[in-house]
Amino acid sequence: QQPVQSPQAVILREGEDAVINCSSSKALYSVHWYRQKHGEAPVFLMILLKGGEQKGHDKISASFNEKKQQSSLYLTASQLSYSGTYFCGTEGMNTGFQKLVFGTGTRLLVSP
Amino acid sequence: ETGVTQSPTHLIKTRGQQVTLRCSSQSGHNTVSWYQQALGQGPQFIFQYYREEENGRGNFPPRFSGLQFPNYSSELNVNALELDDSALYLCASSFDRIRTGRGELFFGEGSRLTVL
């Protein structure tokens, strides 16, 4: 079942913060986050495994609430380069292979 | 730049035809997955190949088939094309997760297929 992302779209001014949420109805093994710019390949941002960990990379961080099967992506002090569509990809338990189910995406536009 | 290359980048086919899409994995990756991305949607899992064998499949009919070669490059074949097959087809390579514990996907830029 496809995870639900919110919001669907967000517009920021450079330097502002944003939070993107991803919610699944299934028990998850991991949550991935990717950013895709128009006409380009999705680019890996980070992966979170069950265990409720939080990870960070520069000014982008994420958390995974295993009990609620929810993940959030935090973008702080946004830059113009953050513009794009953000997808969460969820991986269920015990599949035996790596199948990601992606959400419908969150479009982020950062303006000067 | 992920090191994953796909060809062709764009192609147009007519309904009923067959198409082959190709993917060259990043060096050191022995796992490849194929995803279909319709306009405005997230990618949908088609199947995954690990060490030249299909080891997982999504909800796609058998007319979607694939191959992985000894050098870990890969092909996606679609027979009897339908209008709904029009989409961006993404190839993603990854490390051997069993050996490395790493699960991130490295996507190519995709092949955009239009079926008329």
Image (spheres, coloured by chain):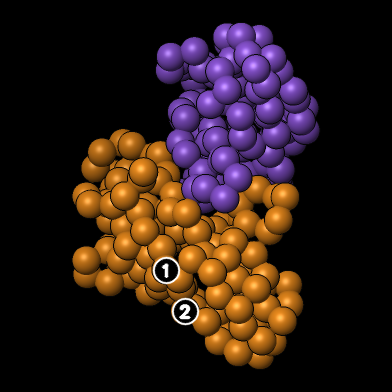
Chain colours: A purple, B orange
Q: Is residue B49 visible?
A: no
Position of residue B113 measured from the top left corner of the image (x, y, whole percent): 60, 71
Of callouts 2 and 1, the N-terminal one: 1
Is A95 or A22 nearer to us in this picture? A22
- Mark 1 lies on a secondary structure that is strand
Between disc 2 and disc 1, the foreground one is 1
Position of residue B41 measured from the top left corner of the image (x, y, whole percent): 70, 50
Q: Amino acid at mark 2?
A: Thr
Residue drawn at point x = 68 percent, y = 58 percent = B38
User: Around disc 1, counting alpha carbons within 10 Å, would you say few (fewer than 14), some (14 to 19), or many (20 or more)?
Assistant: some
Q: Is residue B64 above or below residue B34?
A: below
Placement of the C terminus of chain A among the 4 image quadrants: top right
Residue named by callout 2: B20
Which chain letter goes with mark 1?
Answer: B
User: Around disc 2, counting alpha carbons within 10 Å, would you say few (fewer than 14), some (14 to 19), or many (20 or more)?
Assistant: few
Which chain letter goes with mark 2?
Answer: B
Instruction: Please indicate whether residue A26 sits to the left or right of residue B33 in the image.
Output: right
Q: Which mark is residue A62?
A: none
Residue drawn at point x = 22 percent, y = 69 percent = B70
Q: Amino acid at mark 1?
A: Ser
Structural distance between the alpha carbons of marks 2 and 1 = 9 Å
Residue drawn at point x = 55 percent, y = 63 percent = B89
Residue named by callout 1: B7
Instruction: Please indicate whether residue B116 sits to the left or right of residue B28 in the image.
Output: right
- Mark 2 lies on a secondary structure that is strand
Q: Are marks 2 and 1 on the same chain?
A: yes
In which image quadrant can residue B99 be found?
A: top left
Q: Is residue A11 visible?
A: yes
Labels 2 & 1 near each other (Cβ < 8 A): no
Residue drawn at point x = 33 percent, y = 37 percent = B102
Position of residue A33 measured from the top left corner of the image (x, y, whole percent): 54, 32
Is A31 or A7 nearer to us in this picture? A7
